[in-house]
Image (cartoon, rainbow, N blue to C red):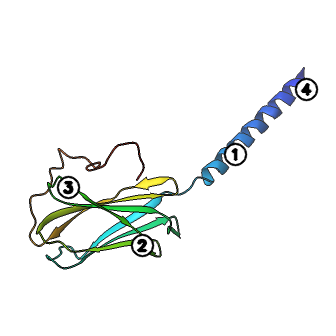
Amino acid sequence: MKKLFVFLMTVLCLSIVISCSNKKEQADNLPQMVDVALTVKPDPGKMNEPITFEAKVTQGKDKVADAEVIFEIWRSKADKHEKVEIKHTENGIYRLEKSFSQEGTYYIISHVTARDMHNMPKKEFTIGSPSEPEDAAKKDSMDGMEMNGEGH
């Protein structure tokens, strides 16, 4: 009986050790998050002069060249949002140059889907004199998104 108890305790201890090491391996194998660094240059910008928008997409130390990137741009309090699909430029950078013919406060969201992950940083920028910003209390970070079950 004593030998059976020692055998069962040994099997139980080994099971626990193996289980813990498998969980650590699984945690080590999880992919890193896709990071998006969104920049607007210059800010503030001038009317009818190009503004450069860049989304630098990385995953850990990897520069992601195969992401799906859509820039959504709109003037504060406007109902219409312009969406532009952006192609990879170089070194994980997705770039758009655009001019604006109206002064005011604007917003950009970069919708980035890469490696089964989605990231949507948002920036506010100004062209000329700022206009009244959107009311953050009434809006949420999902403004302008079409929720029709399709991916971006």
The numbered mark, 2 or 3, whose residue comes first in the sequence reads 3
Give residue 38's position: percent from left, percent from top: 34, 66
Asked whether, in this view, residue 140 is left or right of residue 133, the answer is right
Q: Amino acid at mark 3?
A: Lys
Q: Which amino acid is tagged 2?
A: Ile
* Residue 118, percent from left and from top: 43, 54
Going by the numbered disc 4, the residue's amino acid type is: Lys
- Give the CA distance from mark 3 to mark 1: 51 Å
Query: Which residue bears the numbered disc 2?
Result: 93
Using the image, determine if residue 48 lies above or below residue 104: below
Secondary structure type for disc 2: strand
Which one is closest to the eye, mark 2 or mark 3?
Answer: 3
Percent x, y of residue 68: 44, 61
Q: Earlier in the sequence, mark 1 or mark 4?
A: 4
Which residue occupies 85% across, 25% down?
A: 5
Q: Is residue 122 toward the left or the right of residue 4 in the image? A: left
Of the image marks 4 and 2, the number of the one nearer the N terminus: 4
Mark whose residue sits in front, 1 or 2 = 2
Question: Can you identify the residue that label 1 sits on?
Answer: 22
Q: Earlier in the sequence, mark 3 or mark 4?
A: 4
Tag shown at residue 80: 3
Q: Nearer the viewer, mark 3 or mark 1?
A: 3
Name the residue type under label 1: Asn
